[in-house]
Structure formats: C-alpha cells, structure tokens
Amino acid sequence: MLENNNLKICSRLVRRDIKFHKARSILLMAAIALVCMLYTFSFALGGMIRDGYIYTYKMTYGSDSHIIFYDLNRAQAAALRGHVRAADSVTLSAIGILSDDMLEYRSVKLAAVSSGWAEATDAVPLHGRMPEEKGEIALDELTMNSLAIPYEIGTEVTLWWTTAEGEKREDTFRLCGWWDSLMGLSETCAWITEETARELYPGMLESGHVSLGVTLYRPEKLEEQAEKMLTDLGLGHIPFTTNLACNEARLEFVGSQAMRFYRMNLIVVLCGILMIYNIARTSMQQNVRFYGRVKSLGMAPRQICVFSIERAAFLCVPAIVPGWLAGFALYVAVSPFVVVGIEENPALLFFRLWPFAAGALFTWLTTLAACLLPMRATAKSSPVQAMRFVEGQRGRSRRKGKRRRTTIPLMALSGLARQRGQSVLTAISLLLSLMILCGIWTQAVSYDEETYVSSLALSDYRIEDASATRSIQRYNPRSRSITPELLHALERHPAVTDTGEISTMEVPMYANEKDRAPIVATFEEKAEDGIARKESMANNPDWLAGYEKLRESGEYIGIVTGVKGLALEKALAQSLYIEGSFQPDRFASGKYVIAAGADSGQIRTTPPAGSKITVNGRKFEIMASVPYESSLISGADSKEAQFNITYYMPMEIFDELFPDHGIRNVMVNIDHGRQKEFDSFLAKLLKGTGIAVTSYSDYQWNFRDAIFHRYMIPLFIGSVMLFIGILNFCNAIVTRMLVRKKEFAVYESLGMTGRQIRRMLLWEGALCCGVMVLLLVPVTAASTWVWGRWWLAHTNTWCITWRYSLMPLWVSLPVLLILAVLIPLYCLKSVTRESITERLRVVE
Amino acid sequence: MSIITIHNLKKYYGSGSSQVKALDGVDMTVAQGEFAAIVGPSGSGKTTLLNMMGGLDLPTQGEIIVDGVTLSSLREEQLAVFRRKRVGFIFQNYNLVPTLTVEENILLPLDLDGSSPDTGFLGDVTELLGLKDIMHVYPETLSGGQQQRVAIARALSAKPAIILADEPTGNLDSKNGQNVAGLLKMTTELYHRTLVMITHNLELAQLADRVIRMEDGRIME
C-alpha cells in the first residue's frame, strides 16, 4: 500500500523548474559548460602527454614493430612469422653495416629494399625514390650530413661498410633518394636493390642474417611474449629487442606523468562543485522550501533523489557540447607548447575520443554533487522544518551587555555577520586559489631567463656544420657545409656586428708522468660523496677507457680547437684562469695554447701551465688553463675522444697545422634592431645546406617554453579557481542583496533615507574587503613563503634567483574592493524598485 | 468509529530551562467524516498537532494512529506515501508549486503516486470550486482566494482519508475567507471526508461538528 512511486513526475518537475527559472538555469548551464571545458581540456592534455611520451619512445626505438628478432635464418623467420601471437611482420635482409667512423654513434644497415620495413621504420625516401636499378642507394639525411654527401640525385657515394663476418669493404653507389625522419636517429637503413645486395655479398640473402619485426595482437609483456614465441618454436637463444613504447616500466612512468594532469581534475571537481553550488545557492531558500513543500505533498526521498539526478542531467545536456568545443579549442591552442618537436599539430596527432566521454561523465557527476547539496539540507529535516527554512538563520543571540547605539557601521557589521556562512565559503575559495596562484607564480618568476640564456647562448647565433647538428652526430672535419663564401656573406651582412669561428681536430697526444700526475690525482681522489671521481663516470665506458689509457700510457686525445674573434673571447669569457693567465701577444705568436678543463680551481683536469704539447710535430706551451665552455661547439666528438683535453689556439695557427680543415661553428652577434632582416637572410642563405642554427632567441624561446610548459596548467587552473572564487564573491554579494528586499523596506519604513542605506552598503563592502584582506594577505603571504622556500631547497635547477612575489594577490584585492562596493549599490536599485508596502508583503 | 487516535502526544523543543513544550500530553480522537475545528491562542500547539497528524513532523513521545496506520512505525519513504495517499493538506500560505499549472498542482499527489485520476470526481471538484477556467494558468497569476481553492482541490484529488487545514482562510479577506471555508465544509461533506481545521476565527469554528480548544500544548475540551 505504501510503496508505489511514480518517477516520471520527476522529469516534468525538472523541466518546469528549468523553464521557470530561465536566468538561473542559463547561468548554471554556463558554469557547467566551463566545468566541462576544464575536464575535457585536462583529460585531453593528460592523454596527449601519455601519447606524446609513447610516440617519443617509438621514435627512439626506431620502429612500429613490437618485437624485432635479429640474426634469423629464412626458416626461423618464416616460423616466427607464422606464430599464433604474430598479427603482422616485416622483414629486413641486411648484408652489413655502414662503418665509417663518423657514424659511430648510430647503426646504419646496408640492406636490400624492404618496403614493409621502410614503412615500419619511417625510412621511405621523401626526395627521389627507393633504389630500382643496380648500384643505386637511398640514405637518410643525418647519414648524408655526417658523411658530407651533397643533396643531389645521382651523386657518387663511396661508403665503408662491414659484413656480418666483420670484413670491412669500400663500395661506390649512386644516390637515388633520401629522407629525414625522427625515427631513424639511432638506427636506420641504407637501401640498395636486391640485385646489388646479391652482387656485393653473394649468398648472404639466402643464408640468413634476417631481422624480423613482429606486430603482436596484444602488445603487452613483450619480453615474455618474445621468449614464449621462441620457446614454442624451439628456436633457443635468438637476440631480440622490444619496443620501448610498450615497455611496462616506461608505461608506468608515462602514466605517472599523465597522472599529474589527471590529478588537476581534483581541483576542477572542487571548483566545479563550488561554482555550481554557489549559483544554486542564490535560490537555496527557495530550493529547500520547494523540497519541503513537495515532501509535504507526499514526494518520497527516492523521488527527490531522482529529481536531483535528472536535474543534473537536464542542466548538463545543453552545456556539455559547448564545454567540449571550448575544451577542445583550448587543447588545440595549448598542445603545441606542451609537446614540441613534432611537425604535425600534436592535438590532432594524438586526438582521442575518451577525454570527451570522461569530461561529460565527470561534468555530470560534479553537477549532480552540487545539485544533491540542497537535497541533503532537507534530508534530515521534516517537511515542516524545510518549509520554514531560512538561510543563514542560526538562532544566535547577542551577548547581554550595555545597550549600544545603533550606527550605520554597526548595522553594516551586523548585516555582514548574518551572511558569515557564505562569506567563509567564498573566502576559502579565494584563499585556495590565491595560495596556489601566488605559490606557483613565485616559482615561475624565480626562474632566471638571463642566467639561463647567457650561460647557454654565447652569441646571438651559432651556425653549425651539417655534420654536427645533433648530440648523436660525430663532427666530421671533412665536412665543408660552412663554405668560405657562406662565411664572407655572413660577415658582410650589415646587421652583423661581430663574428667568431671555431674549428676542431682530434689529435692523439702524449702526456708524460709529471704532466698527467695532477689529472690522475684528481680522478682517483674521492669527491665529497665519498666516491672516486672516475667512478662517477662509470656509465660512460668510452670515457673510462680513455682515462685509463692516459693513466697507464700517457696517451690521450686532444681536441685542438682553432678559435677566432668572438669565439676566442667567449672561450675566455669567464676569465677564471685556473692556472696561468692570458697574454694576447704571446698567444698570437703561435707558440702557446690555452687548455680547457674542469670548472673549478680545486681540481686539475689539464696538464699544468708551462708544460708542453706536440701537435703535428709542432711544440706548444700551455699558457693557461680555463674552465671548459661546452656551449662553444655543437655535435659530438668521437667515442675515443670521450675523455679528452681541449686546447685553444689562434685560427691562423690551426690553419697552418690543418690546412684542409672545415669550420665546425660560426658565432654571430647582430644589431638586434635588424633581427628580422637577418633571420630572413639566414633562412635563404642556409636553405638546403643541412646547416643548423641555434640562436639566442631559440634559447629564450626554449626557456619561456619550458617555464610555460611547466607552469601553464597549474597557473591556468589557479586562474580559473580565482575566477570562480571571484564569481562566488559576486554571487554572495548579490544573494545578500536579493534576500534583503523586505529588510530594506523595513529600514525605509522606519525613516532610513536612501543615502543612509547606500552608506550602510558602502560600509558593508569596505568591511567585507577588510575581512578578506585580513584573511587573505597573511595566509597567502605565509603559505607562498613557506612553499617557495621549501621548493627552493628541494629543486635542483641551477638558473634560479629567489623572487618572492604576491602579484596575483595584489591584482585581486582591488578587484574585490571594487566589486564589493559597486555590486550592492547596483543591486539596490533593482531591490528597491517596488514600493515599501509591496516589499513589506514579500514572504521571504 | 475514529479515524484519528492520538495518545499521550508530546512534542518538546530544546532542553533545560529553555525547553518549550509545544504539545504536552495530548489525547484525542476524531471520528470518520467528522469536521473538527481546533482553536486556541498563538503558540498553543495547534499547528504542531496538525503537523503530527499529517506525518509532517515527528513527536517526542506518544502515538498517532491515522486510518489504522501507526505513524511512528513508518519509515520516511512510507511516511511520504502515507501523506500523498491518506492526507490532504491545506496550508495558510497555500504551498502551491509555482512551476506547475493549476491542473498539474491539483494532480500532483496522484502523479507522485503514479495513479490515474478519477476524471469525473476531479471534474466535479474543480467545477464546484470554480477552477474550470483557470486550469492551465500558473499559481502566481491567481488571487489568494483562487490559490486557496486550488489547494483545496489538490487536498481532495487523491481522495484522502483526512483533510488537514491549517488556517486556510488566514491569508484571505473576510468575504473570501467565508467563501473558502464554506466550500471546504461543503466539499468534505459531499465527499464524506474527515476534516480537521485550525482557525482563529470563531465564526468559522462554529461551522465544525466539534470545536477543540487548545492551550499551552494541552486540549481544554
């Protein structure tokens, strides 16, 4: 008898409620759209970060395949291809590996054309075509730059390569195509025709050394699956690698990176509930009384619950699509700054649908939470209590004491005190956002651009030889991409104020026992952490081998560096002579060099000043030793030279010693007023040369981009929170005014003038702001200081200058003051529009 | 045969020296089809008693049996269904839902229950109360008298066992008040409903079969 419940009535009540309170509903929908925008944005961004990392790992691995098996014979490859776990596969038949010294940091296989493999490794020629005729070859641009091969179809290319058996050969090919790909940085192929491969290495293609790239149905636990495949087929030990993009540990790391963005959604949840709830609060009394009324007519708790759920859904439906669009637009605008180094817009490359679904779901849940709050207010009260609900009424009475004369400021204070519940909520929302904003702002402004850029950019532009544009590229002194003509053109440009040249040559050298003793002592000695300095280089076996060679035999690689103009100035710029001093005349004489080593006067990593070195049979004396400036040169030195000692000498002397050398880097300073002109000149001058340019502006941009990348999301969320806090603040003021229609009528009926009411409101505004200042300033200042100092103590970044700033707070306070004063005065007009008697009849 | 039985009903607010005894041991019965008027000064506990009868508020102590149902044994959900099926409320301030039309307001207890209206019965009630022409307008456009007539129609719509009216004419002028009270008496008699009405107006109280006087939370019959 007492169990029948009709739930259909709920949707009618909801529809009517939305239609009846149009303005409030539209405001709520706008707030919900904003919440949906934030959710969609942060979910999409988090997803993009995840996909971006996975993309980078895939690029690093160099293939789309999940597992690559190496050194297979034909039968083994066929068996693996047919395994039940293999969804797809690509095959590569390499006859050897390019073995020019300049490619020692990379692995370039000389292989017969395999279009499947080429696609899986993004090694398809973009200029020219794949080899079709005997003797043709297609290469990637990085290999061409390292080997100083011109970008010209038909060019004769002579390559050193090593067969699988270790035999080193030299052959000449004809260039038919090339490509540039981020996927082939560490490993790629040099394509030749099958016919050429058979001719170069008869029997090789038939006998084996096949690599097989396998795509699995389920790309998880790759190592386990690879082992299982080999065991299933009884293939024993076959070498294989697995795609880094599917590596569990890396995926866990990627997940943790994306989680930073997802975690921000907790703030969005809080903000969203606060914002929607605060808008709903404007009619809290109305809502609670409504619930009381319908409860008294027999609306069951379950029906009220369904009503709230449907209300949330009805409000969400029209708000979600605009929220999605706004969130997506924001995501598209921001993503190029978050994921850099990809030609396509990362927003589109990593587009997924799930953030939209998640955004909609979370928006609905947030709205529901906000909509359920008034229902909760009535849940514990009887229908009678709910129908008599008066917001903010706590039944508190004033302490007994001497009667105070009622003044306008006292009335204002009392008016303010009545709304303290809502004021506390508003203050918390503002405080939270300002604490986050000021804390993050202090961190962001403490990063010192000047320190960062001046440490890394020694000149306005550094022009880099095509063979030395990346850290994995060994500089090739035979490369002539920076030609004398190009150099002259640069020097002659009217915008150029200063230039410098750097050339390097790796030279085997010898240090006698006396000269190498301080170096050995430095590296054998234990550092502050209790570990011998050489042990800290254990992760670089080439360095260790070079050092041990010096320690045992005195032989080492010296990087003889010719410097001219600006380059010499910058090499000595720190003027921190660890030993000796710079004497220009003696340096120019060609009998002296300057050694460059560790950046400390406490340790020695170069032979002592006054000792002698021999370069190409010519003797030089070390005039001084200075800290090594790593930003002076680009690219990498050979593996053998991982342990080296750099010697600076005048470029004229370097020319005499190595008359056929190329230029590794050119440094250029310009008149900054003509930067645009110079940039366009440079773009034209360097087009198609493979030469790279790193400019001062690049470092600035990198710095700003890094700071932006690091702090954009928290600052954005903090700003949205502040915006919501300010909205709540406005909302609280408006609500305070709207519910006082009758109160103002009573004042007026008792003889209070309009001017006195306005004065009272001004007092209220000022007092409200005063309370906010008393709360916000000390708490925000203290939290920013504590958080900032903690961050400073725990961060490892070197380019920080502590800058304590409460800028967001100082910007917000005047805004709050203006709003606190103006909104009540504006609302007063509409509240007092009706006559006193009409307003006195109002049932609040 | 009594349709409402109240035994030793108490409702206290607060505690200690500030305790207010809104109802202090009320015992009473109301017979089926009876029209009982409750009168008494402000603060005597009339509205509290009426709210207890309708299951709108919970007593501190005592028992209320309405139409055979002991209210203290009901869970909140059951209490809600009890209100919608067994009780028709008429409030001094009407308590109409502003977002629903007159017709929808009248049918709301039935809609909440998911039951079909007795169209003939409702047609008669609305005809009788003079609401036929305003069925599709919203309450805010109606006068106080009209709104109270809508409230009476709503109270009758689910054919409840009892109708509880809390100063139904309190917000109306004397002419409208007389009209509404007359209509209320007429409709409850016509449809054989039990009516318990609170009023300050002794003239209206004379219309009742029985007048119950309350003072300080007690019945002074």
Image (cartoon, coloured by chain):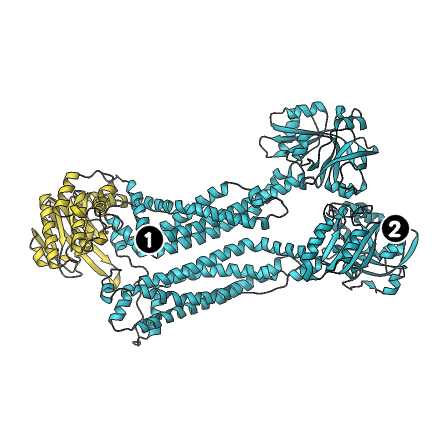
- Dot 2 crowding, Cα within 10 Å, few <14, some 14–19, many 20+: some
Residue A839, by quadrant, is bottom left
Position of the C terminus of chain A by quadrant: bottom left
Position of residue A211 relative to residue A669, above or below, is above
A219 to the left or right of A474 = left
Residue A527, by quadrant, is bottom right
Measuring from the top left, give residue A382's x and y in whole percent: 26, 52
Measuring from the top left, give residue A372's x and y in whole percent: 36, 49
Q: Is mark 1 on a helix, strand or loop?
A: helix
Mark closer to the chain start, 1 or 2: 1
Give the colour in which the image draws chain A. Answer: cyan
Indicate the chain on which mark 2 is placed. A
Measuring from the top left, give residue A78's x and y in whole percent: 67, 23
Q: Is mark 2 on a helix, strand or loop?
A: loop
* Numbered label attached to residue A446: none
- The residue where tag 2 is placed is A658
* Numbered label attached to residue A377: 1
Give the colour in which the image draws chain B. Answer: yellow
Position of the N terminus of chain A by quadrant: top left
